[in-house]
Image: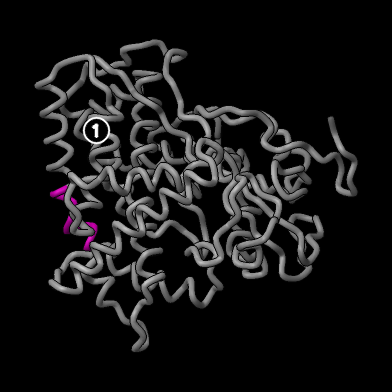
Amino acid sequence: MEHPVTAGSCRFYPFSDRTDLNIDPTYGELRSKEPVARVRMPYGGDAWLVTRHADAKKALSDPRLSIAAGAGRDVPRASPRLQEPDGLMGLPPDAHARLRRLVATAFTPKRVRDIAPRVVQLADKLLDDVVETGPPADLVQQLALPLPVMIICEMMGIGYDEQHLFRAFSDALMSSTRYTADQVDRAVEDFVEYLGGLLAQRRAHRTDDLLGALVEARDDGDRLTEGELVMLTGGLLVGGHETTASQIASQIFLLLRDRTRYEQLHARPELIPTAVEELLRVAPLWASVGPTRIATEDLELNGTTIRAGDAVVFSLASANQDDDVFANAADVVLDRDPNPHIAFGHGPHYCIGASLARLEIQAAIGALARRLPGLRLAVEENELEWNKGMMVRSLVSLPVTW
């Protein structure tokens, strides 16, 4: 059913309930005919959906489109939960920039280069166990998930055996409809209690890990508040593993879906960094659009007038399929260069851990391509199960053999 509006027909969003890596063809139609389209969101009413690469980049860096302006309000959105006003994404621009500056020191190019040998070492260690156990193996549970979890635990100074405590919180936080509001609230309460104990330990015994650094962090003479510490630590633990684990598994799947891709990387491992950029472009991470932005004043976007108070949402997956930017955008071109994808976002909310995520994905794929040339899917593609009710597109398991 369509609803007539000034800008044309208002479509119901999402267009389908796909959770795998295929995106609905409606996005392609909109890029061609209605790049800034009116859509009816599952919650909160109507929004403008941006689908083209150039428009998304422009709008994502426009300060007049504000996540903070919609935080805590019943604005049009994809998830039943409201954007938290005291979460990092929902903070006013000055507060958001201040906290990003503090965290950014953990992800400088030098720090990522310094940690690279350890990431490669852990990827190889995980593959040692895979090979020793023998096929079939599940590369979600045996590689894609443990690698980023181990790295973020080491960076934060948290024992790997405590991962279940923050992974329960992470699953609840990344849920769109899988968990009820009460279940999410309980998971948050349990995590805050757990984190409070960690912070007390750091205050009693100083450490030089990232959590210790956050406890000691100052910006313009002001220490982080307790609430800011909890928010940042939670964000780092969730963002430091959940999305990267999903991408590692998705990218391996895409390589094995057409084994000529995997064979190409085995023969030419120097292509892996470029290939990972292409796989980031074509493997959509988010199951839906990201946080809603609210226009704080009237503006124009690709000939469409956005009024103050209007809601705007973006499809990064659609933008990364834009044929005006990527020749043969539907194809997987492992040596595509340049590749200006926006898989990590754009503007002030660009993913702060992008360099670490790239490193971990490259290490995982590199270890596989180097050591298991015969790697292949152990089941048919239609037998793979994808998680439902979550904000990210992720495989439940990835059975392989060799």
Q: Quadrant of the C terminus?
A: top left
Residue 374 placement, left or right of 285: left
x, y percent for residue 339: 46, 45
Up the image or down, 265 lies above or below 96; here it is: above
Q: Residue at x 33, y 51 (%)?
A: 240
Up the image or down, 213 lies above or below 353; here it is: below
Looking at the image, which is closer to me, 349 or 190? 190
Q: Give the quarter of the image for residue 100.
A: bottom left
Instruction: Specify whether residue 354 is in view.
Output: no
Question: For numbered disc 1, what is the local secondary structure?
Answer: helix
x, y percent for residue 241: 32, 46
x, y percent for residue 333: 44, 32
Segment tinted magenta in the rendering = 111-118
Q: Quadrant of the N terminus?
A: top right
Residue 312 among magenta residues: no
Q: Give the quarter of the image for residue 372.
A: top left
Q: Residue at x 80, y 56 (%)?
A: 303
Looking at the image, which is closer to me, 173 or 48? 173
Q: Which residue is drawn at 40% across and 26% down?
A: 254
x, y percent for residue 163: 25, 45
Which amino acid type is shown beneath numbered disc 1? Leu
Residue 117 among magenta residues: yes
Q: Provide the major secondary structure of the magenta segment.
A: helix
Query: Where is mark 1, residue-wise?
Result: 143
